[in-house]
Image (cartoon, rainbow, N blue to C red):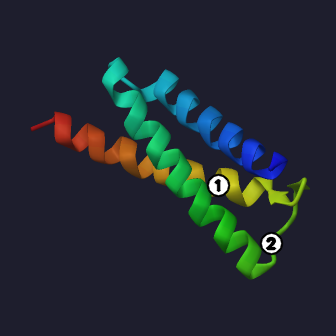
Amino acid sequence: MTTFILFLWLAGMCGLAFHFFYGQSLSSIPFFLLAAVGGAIVGYTASVLLGLNFLSVGGLPVLGTALGAILFLSLVQRIQVKDEQR
């Protein structure tokens, strides 16, 4: 259970940090949070399957999880910028 809470905290912090730097309105917060959770799931899964547990806290590969969240967040940010330029 603590690993799940740490997972949600890490994804939430990544999402809120991206919103702080790149979000234009409050309505973009759910998109950033969903992208962070989705990316964290992919990063966690990839880290576990590939055995890349460089920094693990409580069974959670923190580095892989954070990298997955940041990757998905950067994709959402790029899509959001291109959508606003239309």
Identified at 57% across, 65% down, the residue is 42
Relative horizontal placement of residue 4, taking residue 21 as reference (left or right) = right
Taking depth in this image into account, of 40 and 22 the one nearest to the observer is 40
Identified at 35% across, 29% down, the residue is 28
Single out the residue that lies furthest toward the top: 25
Up-down relation of residue 43 to residue 83 (above or below): below
Single out the residue that lies furthest toward the front: 1
In percent of width and height, residue 78 lies at 34, 45
In percent of width and height, residue 80 lies at 28, 40
Alpha-carbon span between mark 2 and mark 1: 12 Å
Up-down relation of residue 85 to residue 23 (above or below): below
Identified at 74% across, 80% down, the residue is 50
In percent of width and height, residue 46 lies at 66, 73
Q: Amino acid at mark 2?
A: Leu
Q: Element type at marker 1?
A: helix
Which residue, given by chain and number where applicable, does mark 1 sit on?
67
The image's mark for residue 4 is none
Q: Please tell me how crowded label 2 is: few (under 14), some (14-19), or many (20+) other residues with Cα within 10 Å.
A: some
In percent of width and height, residue 12 lies at 60, 36
Which residue, given by chain and number where applicable, does mark 2 sit on?
52
The quadrant holding residue 85 is top left
Comes first in the chain, label 2 or label 1:
2
Up-down relation of residue 14 to residue 60 (above or below): above
Relative horizontal placement of residue 50, taking residue 85 as reference (left or right) = right
Q: Count the numbered circles shown.
A: 2
